Image (cartoon, coloured by chain):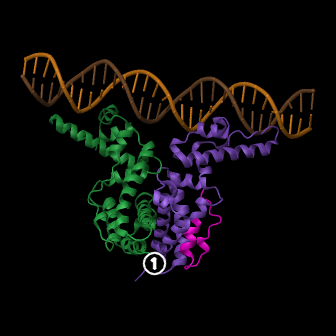
Chain colours: A green, B purple, C brown, D orange
DNA sequence: CACATCGGTCAACCGCTGTAGAGTGAACGC
DNA sequence: GCGTTCACTCTACAGCGGTTGACCGATGTG
């Protein structure tokens, strides 16, 4: 967002673009450096704007973060998947989130901060994990469905962090298809636990 | 570490106890609030000591963190396990680390900060994951051994974070044996990948 | 006992960062 | 055209937090 020229645009459009520029800069900063190390001043500079304007638009750094770090549930397939489809659906959702077209930065921003920022932790626990796990548990059925669904979520968290945030070489460097092929049976062991 | 009385102890012993008190307070603070939110002042107060003394002992907040957040590899069994034992060995190591006798706080401190603190990320990636994964890969053998070992690590990271840091209810509240029983076949799917 | 040493404290500095309030010039409605 | 509105900027405040250097009193040593 290095200075998009906004000369003589209608006010409404101007406002929307500025807000979008700030949000994008914020997502990038929060995703890259984490909440604490990301400063309003850097966000503003990246958006080509005065720091005070960020406050005017979002009120506080906390609220800016809340607006920037969203976990979009659209295009997710895991909740409408059958037992059979569930493993590949879960993997597909993760890949799409981080390698697909949507705003990957927002997801990274949330994930990067979920261990150190209270609100990010809450969203991750309640909205991303618990709600979804409850739906998955219904699909699973059988004994300990809640725990099995939670463990599926845990594995997905681990895979996401290892591949996209920690960037552990063999996991981050592998081709998507290879990871999918190897992980599918892993998740299946939680869908259909052996006796 | 609320005020251990140290009247009239030999200097050397006094020094050791103070250093230990600071380290314990630091581990707790870093584990609980993360690097940025943990302040030298709070650490010092918790250790019953002046903030300046912390600097005198450790030089800087960075070095204090490096001293506090260690991932002890002692008592780990995964590297000496056979293919057959590997899944339960990995789970055993994780449980022992976080529920066993050793200093759990140091491990939590490292894990909590590995997404936002550069040095913590480095340790997690290089020392905790890569080195161990290389050993595990040798035990595994076969095709894509490195990737499979990395994915085992990823699952362990996910399990650890979900259970001990994010505290996702079904995973955090489950009994250790139940998690072990359900996760063992999960890891086995990476040890002996189905054709 | 006198002097050096060392654990420990006190007070202060200084840079950074979130935040607030007044001000400015261009777009808008009449 | 003209006053109003609104996006936006400038400047400044205030608190926090890492870090420092001078200082103090007890412990050790000859």
Residue C28 appears in which quarter of the rendering? top left
Q: Relative to A17, does residue B168 appear above or below in the rendering?
A: below
Is any atom of residue B110 visible in this view? yes
* Residue B99: % across, % down: 60, 60
Q: Relative to A71, does residue A3 appear above or below in the rendering?
A: above
Is any atom of residue B63 visible in this view? no
* Residue A52: % across, % down: 33, 31
The chain letter for the residue carrying disc 1 is A
Total numbered circles: 1
**Residue name at image x 41 percent, y 65 percent:** A149
Answer left or right for A106 relative to B145: left
What range is drawn magenta here? Answer: B70-93
Residue B89 on the magenta segment: yes
Answer left or right for B125 relative to B195: right
Residue A142 on the magenta segment: no
Viewer-closest of A17 and B75:
B75
Q: Tell me the residue that label 1 is attached to.
A: A194
Q: Secondary structure at mark 1?
A: loop
Answer left or right for A122 relative to A92: right
Q: Relative to B2, does residue A150 appear above or below in the rendering?
A: below
Viewer-closest of A164 and C2:
A164
Q: Relative to B12, does residue A146 appear above or below in the rendering?
A: below
**Residue name at image x 35 percent, y 53 percent:** A107
Residue B2 appears in which quarter of the rendering? top right
* Residue B25: % across, % down: 63, 44
């Amino acid at each position: 967002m290095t200075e998009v020229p906004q000369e003589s645009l209608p006010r409404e459009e101007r406002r929307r673009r500025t807000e979008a520029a700030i949000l994008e800069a914020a997502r990038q900063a929060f995703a890259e450096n984490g909440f604490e190390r990301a400063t309003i001043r850097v966000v503003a500079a990246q958006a080509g704007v005065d720091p005070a304007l960020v406050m005017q638009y979002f009120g506080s750094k906390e609220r800016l973060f809340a607006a920037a770090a969203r976990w979009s549930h659209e295009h997710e397939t895991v909740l409408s998947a059958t037992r059979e489809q569930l493993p590949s659906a879960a993997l597909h959702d993760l890949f799409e989130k981080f390698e697909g077209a949507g705003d990957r930065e927002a997801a990274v921003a949330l994930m990067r901060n979920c261990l150190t920022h209270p609100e990010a932790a809450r969203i991750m626990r309640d909205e991303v994990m618990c709600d979804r796990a409850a739906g998955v548990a219904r699909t699973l059925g059988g004994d300990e469905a809640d725990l099995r669904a939670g463990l599926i979520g845990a594995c997905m968290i681990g895979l996401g962090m290892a591949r996209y945030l920690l960037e552990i070489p063999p996991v981050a460097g592998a081709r998507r298809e290879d990871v999918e092929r190897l992980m599918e049976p892993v998740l299946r062991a939680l869908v259909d636990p052996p006796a």
